[in-house]
Image (spheres, grey):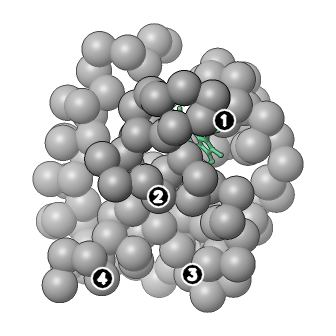
């Protein structure tokens, strides 16, 4: 699956979906607190205003704060398995255990809620 064209549309759709889904979110499988200690390696790319990264060159990075927890976990698993092919994200996801994925996903999901309040 190529990620180029439908990215913005899929994020918009996911955000709209999440607004409804969070109203009755099931019990979280990951710990946002533990996840917050694991995201230093994500922030360099995903935490920049405008969602651009500056190294090695300026390019767009998806906004994951506020993304649905299950979506983040699934995306990371797909990078790890090779279903998604982006080289940097594949290397990063390969270094994460299932528990790590659940925790960082929990962190980013609640981060979006906090920003929205
Ligand atoms: C070197 C920069 C970089 C780092 C570090 C990085 N990412 Fe990414 N990430 C990207 C880019 C670029 C994409 C878009 C890749 C693509 O097109 O598939 C992406 C995509 C993603 C996606 C999919 C988003 C979507 O909307 O489908 C998730 C989830 C994600 N990253 C989570 C993380 C997490 C969690 C970490 C830290 C453990 C992390 N990333 C670290 C650059 C980075």
Task: State how far apart marks 4 and 2 are (Cα).
Answer: 15 Å
Q: Which residue is mark 1?
A: 89
Vertical order, 98 against 112 (above or below)? above
Q: Residue at x 75, y 43 (%)?
A: 92
Q: Residue at x 66, y 35 (%)?
A: 89
Vertical order, 33 against 9 (above or below)? below
Q: Nearer the viewer, mark 4 or mark 2?
A: 2
Q: Quadrant of residue 12?
A: top left
Q: Which residue is mark 2?
A: 47
Task: State how far apart marks 3 and 1 are (Cα).
Answer: 20 Å
Q: Nearer the viewer, mark 4 or mark 3?
A: 4
Residue in the foreground of this view, choosing between 65 and 83: 65
Q: Contact, CB < 8 Å: mark 1 with mark 4? A: no
Number of the label disc, if any, that sits on residue 114: 4
Task: State how far apart marks 2 and 3 are (Cα).
Answer: 16 Å
Does residue 9 appear to the left or right of 43 in the view shown? Answer: left
């Amino acid at each position: 699956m190529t990620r180029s064209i439908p990215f913005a549309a899929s994020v918009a759709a996911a955000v709209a979906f999440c607004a409804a889904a969070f109203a009755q979110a099931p019990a979280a499988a990951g710990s946002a607190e533990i996840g917050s200690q694991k995201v230093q390696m994500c922030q360099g790319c995903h935490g920049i205003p405008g969602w651009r990264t500056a190294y090695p060159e300026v390019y767009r990075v998806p906004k994951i704060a506020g993304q649905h927890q299950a979506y983040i976990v699934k995306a990371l698993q797909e990078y790890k398995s090779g279903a998604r092919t982006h080289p940097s994200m594949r290397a990063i996801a390969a270094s994460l255990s299932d528990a790590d994925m659940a925790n960082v996903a929990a962190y980013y999901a609640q981060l979006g809620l906090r920003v929205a309040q």
